Structures are given as C-alpha cells and as structure tokens.
Image (spheres, helix red, strand yellow):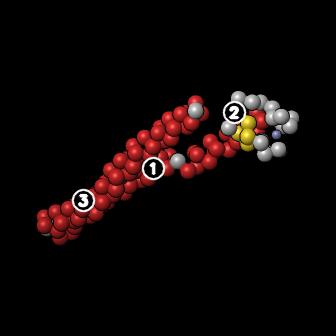
Amino acid sequence: MIRCPNCNREQPDSILTCDCGFNLQVYAEKREAERRKHNTVTRPYQVLPILFLVLRLIGILSMLGGLIYGLSLYAQEESAWLMAGAFFGGILAGLPYFALSEVLIILLHMSEKQDKMILALEKIEEKG
Ligand SMILES: [Zn+2]
C-alpha cells in the first residue's frame, strides 16, 4: 500500500495515478530510491570488510614489528632471549587484531543473512 501525499488516501502499489490525480508512480519511485540510498548508508557490511583488512594489516604489522625489533636487538645485544621475547611480544600484540578480524567476519556473514531475511520478508509483505 502507498499513501498519497496529496490527499492522504491509501492506494494499492499497482495504482499509477491516485483518484485525486496525483502521480503515484513518480512518488513511489522517489521513495524507493530514497529507501535504497538509506539502506546502503546503514548497511554495516560495506564498512566491515575494510575494517577487517585494516585489523589484519595491524596484526601483520605488529608481528613484523616484533620480528624486526627482535632482529635489531639480536644485532645489538647478541641475545637470543631478547630476540625471542621481542618476537613473541609482537605475535602477542598482533593476536587481538587477528581475533577481532575473525569476529568481524562472523558479523559480516550474519549481517548478510539478516539482509537476505529482510528482503525475503519484504517480498512476503508485497505479496500479502
Ligand atoms: Zn491522492
């Protein structure tokens, strides 16, 4: 159902022109375009893949940082313990980012499913 903005009467979606002469087709298309624009802005899974990549990158960088720091420590101090410590420190620092990126992947799949559910519900509503 669509409510005519001119006379405020409910009309079936299939009707192109309202009883009052108002062009409902143009109005419905505008409303649909507005709704789509709104949907793409609020859809979280368009931002999530970027966040996922950023988190993975931070995780890799912190691991690399630990490795490089460990190697430079080994060159300066010639201590394998310091090197191993820095290396594992880097891995430990990177782990939360990897864990977060995994959580994001789960969220991503969930929001995709949710979107499909909403689309299916909308189709059912249109039929009814
Ligand atoms: Zn009307």
Q: Residue at x 52, y 47 (%)?
A: 43
Q: Amino acid at mark 1?
A: Leu
Q: Residue at x 76, y 39 (%)?
A: 27
Q: Are marks 3 and 2 in contact (CB under 8 Å)?
A: no
Q: Position of residue 37 (x, y in %)?
A: 63, 45
Q: Between 101 and 71, which is closer to the camera in this rendering? A: 101
Crowding near the residue tagged with mark 3, few <14, some 14–19, many ≥20 C-alpha atoms within 10 Å = many
Most distant residue in the right direction: 21
Q: Position of residue 20 (x, y in %)?
A: 86, 37
Give the residue pinned by disc 3: 91
Hey, which quadrant is residue 100 in on the image?
Answer: bottom left
Evaluate whether residue 73 shows in this view.
yes
Give the residue pinned by disc 1: 48
The mark nearer the N terminus, 3 or 2, is 2
Quick check: 23 left or right of 78?
Answer: right
Hey, which quadrant is residue 91 in on the image?
Answer: bottom left
Give the residue pinned by disc 2: 13
Q: Residue at x 69, y 33 (%)?
A: 13
Crowding near the residue tagged with mark 2, few <14, some 14–19, many ≥20 C-alpha atoms within 10 Å = few
Q: CA distance from mark 2 to mark 1?
A: 35 Å
Q: Position of residue 24 (x, y in %)?
A: 78, 36
